Amino acid sequence: MSTDRPTPATANKATPRTPEREAWLQLSVRQEEWLWAGILLTPSLILFVVMVLWPALVGLYLSFTNYRLPGVPQFIGVAQYARLIRDPDVHQAAVNTFILFAEVVPVTIILSFLIAALLNQPLRFRRALQVFYFLPLIASAVATAAMFRYLLYRQGGLLNSAISLIVPVEIDFLGDPNLALHTISVLIIWGAIPISVILYLAALQQVPAELYEAAAIDGAGVLSSFRHVTWPLVTPTTFMLVILIGLGATIGSFDLVRVLTNGGPLGATTTLVYLIFQRGFLEMNLGSAAAIGYTLFAGVLLITLFQFRTQQRWVHY
Amino acid sequence: MSYSLRSLQRSQSLISYVLLTLGAVTMVMPILYTVSSSLKIARKVYVYPPELIPNPVRLENYIDALKFLEPYTFVNSALSSIAIVVGLTVLGLTAGFAFARLSFPLRDPLFVFLVSALLIPGHVTIIPMFVFINQLGWVNTFQGLVLPVIGGVSLPIFWFRQFFRTVPSELYDAARIDGANPGQIFLSVYLPEARPAIAAYGVLTFLGAWNLYLWPLLILRQQGTETVTLRLALLQAGSIEPQLAMAGTILSMLPILILFIVAQRQFIQGISRSGLVG
């Protein structure tokens, strides 16, 4: 009759059972989260496995074969890797890749930091100046190549015309084997500065203005306050940029090299990424291309792990 | 503030102006020179000394360049870039939310695994990817162009997870106690919050998709399927007159420029709130 209606007595009896009921409820809450995690993650995971993981594993397998088109892959163990060690083209490409990395990363970081720190001051034409630094962001590597190709032209290009006003020489920026790689570096730096400045500016805007004022009252000059106040405050951004630009310089160099120099002259601008393309798609030697790819991956992985390991020494969160 | 300190500051800001102006000119000169050359008549492109202001101005260069680039390449680039942006943003938002706010078994190892794939250079997987797409018969197709790119979910997942972690978790817990399920909370609380992060990610990804070169070079081998960037590279290889190549280069960048002008406020806001800086 009145069994449905909880009397004070039954309510009291029910109390010890509450933890049990809560435990059951919690489990259901958790299961609901698992279910939703599954719904939200599955599309990403499927695409990732099919489009990234699977090709990566197939590539790893191919690097242990002698796959050449037309033909079928035959397992040959680590022979491809052993060949790489003695391959002068690979040596040259590895050195070129490292030079790009060593030139592009520090120069981009230092220039972008200085530009951002200068732009972060209360200057009158700050916004207008900012636009000029952001503008190259719209240029693809292919567009960058197109613009610089004519700018750097040997006869009548803007840069050579300007130089010849001072000294009567004609510099072949892209055709001289001693210069071409450094020219590519400069182009990568030009393309990487905008996004680096944007990220530094975003980070600097979170630095309290009082810090600069305190430094100014202490009589710190612009450069020394940049060095001792601003720089340490943006080390997390610097760390992220070192990794991003490092990857960009080593990997992203492909488009510029392909459009401007095709790896020449005499292999002077052949980077590892370009060599992968050359071996795989021009010489149809897929096994060798895959082995170069995984060697590059190992290098990137090692350098990145090293950076994460050493970050406590200089990155302040 | 003493007089000397004020004069010191004044001289400092003068130096700042000089340095910043020099840098700005260097950064913008290649683009200015390209715009200038794109408006010249053929025999004026390489005159000595170089003329920065073209005289006479030949606007028809742009019509000729568009004929070389072909209007359809702009349609192809726009459609594929939009598909890539929408695909990656939706996947990044949903998975990023799950990693940021839901608890489920193997969450952290799975996240580290997905994100560490960022270190695999795309060029390492591109050969097996091409073989795979070729087997599917997807060479010269839209899905063959965009799906492998959308598979690169690591970056958007990282990006949106970092952003969602800046949204206070109390919002999630409170809505949960009110009886909302995670899907409802995602749609009604977290998605509206993410607008600046979506804008910044969307703009950068559109830029990246529009500028893709290697993958379209491999996968689009038929006339009629090319993107603007691919066509622009072909133009450079061919013997097109320089002023037309310059005009084509400017044309290829215009859509991106317009996008930045339209979205700049949200873009900057999204970058500063992304949880990536500071």
Image (cartoon, rainbow, N blue to C red):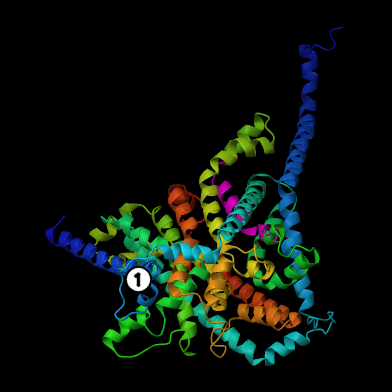
Q: Say if residue A221 shows up in the picture.
A: no
Where residue A84 appears, as percent x and y from the top left, is 69, 88
Which type of secondary structure does the marked residue at label 1 adopt? helix
Where residue B52 appears, as percent x and y from the top left, is 31, 71
- The residue shown at (36%, 82%) is A156
Between residues A283 and A53, which one lies in front from this camera angle? A283
Relative to A149, say whether B255 is above or below: above
Between residues A106 and A278, which one lies in front from this camera angle? A278
Q: Is residue A202 left or right of residue A209?
A: right
Where, by quadrant of the figure, is residue A304 drawn?
bottom right
Image: magenta residue range: B146-168
Q: Which chain is home to disc 1?
A: B
Dot 1 corresponds to which residue? B26
> Three-letter amino acid code at disc 1?
Thr
Q: Is residue B154 left or right of residue B274?
A: right
Where residue B46 appears, as percent x and y from the top left, is 37, 79
Where, by quadrant of the figure, is residue B25 drawn?
bottom left
- The residue shown at (53%, 88%) is A265
Residue B69 lies in the magenta stretch: no
Residue at the top extreme of this rendering = A1
Between residues B252 and B64, which one lies in front from this camera angle? B64
Relative to A73, say whether A52 is above or below: above
Between residues A29 and A126, which one lies in front from this camera angle? A126
